[in-house]
Image (cartoon, helix red, strand yellow):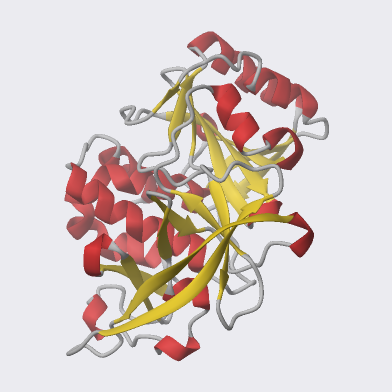
Amino acid sequence: MNNNKIKQALQKIEPDNQAKERMLEQILCRKHIETRKDIKVSSMNNIIKWVIPAAACLVIAITAVLASELFTDYGTIDIDKGKEGSMSIDVSQKSGTEDSSTEDKDRPIVPWNQRHVTQQFYTIKFGGAEYITTSPKAIAAADIQAQLGEITVTGYDRSEKTSTTEYNINCEVYSVKNISSNAVIAVKFNGHGGYFPFVSTTYSPITLEDFVNDMNLQENLKFGKIYDNSEKGQDGTIAYTLEDQSVLWDMLFSDTSIKAQTNIPYSDMLMSISVAVDIIGIEDDQFLLNQDGYLRTNLVASSRGISFFIGKDKSSEIIEYVRQNATQTKELW
């Protein structure tokens, strides 16, 4: 079964809430925790990280294929539930030459003391909200503002298959320069240098304007490569690069009064725009334009991303502008 057939099958499935939560946690963990600098995320991986949550009920049948595609040459990370719903991670090392059908339980686990502190304490609860790490890279001290409070965070080490060890650590919580703490906070762990970014998993802006302002996107957002999913083939897809990104910004955010929506059914993605917010360590997330006229983003870690209905006409206008004005290249899977 090739990748295109897998994707087509996945997009037809709507999982139950429990399955979506489980798969989302796995994807977020894989996406945010990888610390090796030599990892390059292909356009196919960017597409898959959106499609997989819609396929929990097919995951057993396609485990071997996805494992080969997504986890070659680097560690995978498994999420476990701890007390009171807190999440911890178990980091597994898997060789690219290993049989992709090997069960998770047979993979060696990275010892607790060899994990980065953001791998040990992957999520925190603060002010009634849950936050998840975005990067092991510390935020610049100049971008840290007021201290918001102090909390104790619990992590769970399950590297020993027969037992679980609980760890606690004190930390300080700070706001980040010109970014709403409803969306992002910085965490300083006791005994560890640096302030590490965490984004809210429950962040819910009212409008597109709120989203832009809360994340200070006017200053922080950077566009990367743009992938034309309607022109993908068996061996690759078309990628575009825009020299002048101001027009793209104006087109995407021409009407900021649009209401934010969640739990929008999945539909075919026409174009995906790579985005980065360097200040909080987000290097390769996505703005997606789908066939129903929605702009969807996984820039924040709400359960199914945030969507804005910009309309089919606006979506088509953006896609046509990119095709006519951007530099085009072919990228292989």
Q: In this view, does 277 lie above or below 190?
A: above
Q: Where is residue 164 in the image (x, y as percent from the top left)?
A: 24, 84
Is residue 150 in sight in this rendering? yes
Numbered label tally: 0
Nearest to the observer: residue 61 or residue 53: 53
Q: In this view, does 161 lie above or below 143?
A: below
Nearest to the observer: residue 132 or residue 276: 132
The part of the image, by quadrant, that contains residue 196 is bottom right
Q: Position of residue 62 (x, y in %)?
A: 25, 57
Q: Which residue is pictured at 57% across the width and 27% down the height?
A: 210
Q: Which residue is pictured at 43% across the width and 67% down the height?
A: 122
Q: Position of residue 92 (x, y in %)?
A: 37, 80
Furthest residue to the top? 313
Nearest to the observer: residue 136 or residue 233: 136
Q: Which residue is pictured at 68% across the width and 36% down the height?
A: 217
Q: Which residue is pictured at 45% across the width and 28% down the height?
A: 307
Is residue 74 in sight in this rendering? no
Q: Is residue 198 left or right of residue 96?
A: right
Nearest to the observer: residue 302 or residue 106: 302
Q: In this view, does 216 lie to the left or right of 123?
A: right
Q: Position of residue 9 (x, y in %)?
A: 26, 40
Q: Is residue 265 left or right of residue 59?
A: right
The part of the image, by quadrant, that contains residue 314 is top right
